[in-house]
Image (cartoon, helix red, strand yellow):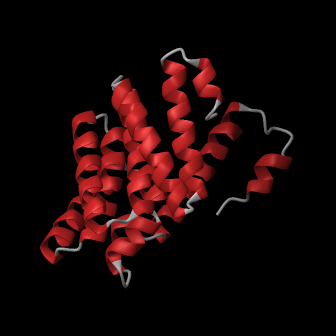
């Protein structure tokens, strides 16, 4: 294989042909790395606990491919419903709602987040309810349903605070502050941002 230092140290490194060779070299390196790493699907379903793997690595998987994330979340929703696992169902519906946002399917986003909230309420899991409500707050904001956004935001703050979840609390406050900014209420926004 060609040596990268050859391209960098050569006096002719600025020539168009050298540049093309360098790009080809880098492309080969990327292809070799991709060929050696298992696909996201293989990583999920070869793990001991596919649900835990997917939820723990959700941000990375969603960023790589929202469609792939949605495919696997759909499988997990079915599994959670079949097993009547309310906690898993609530978490998966929440994540699937977030993926729907990235796919610009806002109605499905809201529907999944509301389903997640109902399941979390059945469990009386305050931390989970707070996390879902902060997502509903920003979702309603994006859809310009500001009354619901404010209501979700205040509920999220209350629940995140009582659950002692500081990360959720900060995010809920930020989301509510963004809603107040959109409403032009800078004085209220300043209380949360």
Q: Is residue 171 visible?
A: yes
Residue sitting nearer the eye, 17 or 67: 67
Q: Pick out the residue farthest to the top.
A: 184
Measuring from the top left, give residue 105's x and y in whole percent: 26, 36
Number of numbered tags placed on the structure image: 0
Q: 88 or 38: which is nearer to us?
A: 88
Q: Position of residue 96 (x, y in %)?
A: 30, 52
- The image quadrant where one finds the C terminus is top right
Considering the image in quadrants, where does the N terminus appear?
Answer: bottom right
Q: Position of residue 139 (x, y in %)?
A: 37, 36
Q: Residue at 45% of width from left, 39% of height from top?
A: 153
Q: Residue 31 versus residue 150: which sits nearer the camera?
A: 150
User: Which residue: 17% across, 77% down?
Assistant: 83
Quadrant position of residue 58: bottom left
Q: Is residue 148 left or right of residue 11?
A: left
In the figure, 125 relative to 94: above or below?
below
Q: Residue at the location (59% across, 55% down)?
A: 167
Quadrant for residue 77, please give it. bottom left
Give percent across and percent down for residue 159: 46, 54
Q: Is residue 82 left or right of residue 15?
A: left
Q: Note whether 43 is above or below 137 in the view shown.
A: below
Q: Is residue 72 visible?
A: no
């Amino acid at each position: 294989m060609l040596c990268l230092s050859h391209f960098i140290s050569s006096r002719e490194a600025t020539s168009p042909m050298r540049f093309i060779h360098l790009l080809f070299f880098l492309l080969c390196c990327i292809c070799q790395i991709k060929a050696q790493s298992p696909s996201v699907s293989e990583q999920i379903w070869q793990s001991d606990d596919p649900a835990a793997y997917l939820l723990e690595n959700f941000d990375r998987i969603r960023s790589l491919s929202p469609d792939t994330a949605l495919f696997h979340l759909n499988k997990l929703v079915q599994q959670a419903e079949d097993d009547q696992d309310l906690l898993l169902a609530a978490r998966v519906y929440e994540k699937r709602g977030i993926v729907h946002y990235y796919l610009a399917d806002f109605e499905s986003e809201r529907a999944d987040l509301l389903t997640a909230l109902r399941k979390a309420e059945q469990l009386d899991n305050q931390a989970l309810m707070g996390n879902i409500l902060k997502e509903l707050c920003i979702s309603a904001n994006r859809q310009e349903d500001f009354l619901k956004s404010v209501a979700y935001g205040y509920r999220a703050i209350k629940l995140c605070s009582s659950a002692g979840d500081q990360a959720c609390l900060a995010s809920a406050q930020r989301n509510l502050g963004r809603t107040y900014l959109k409403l032009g209420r800078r004085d209220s926004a300043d209380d949360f941002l």
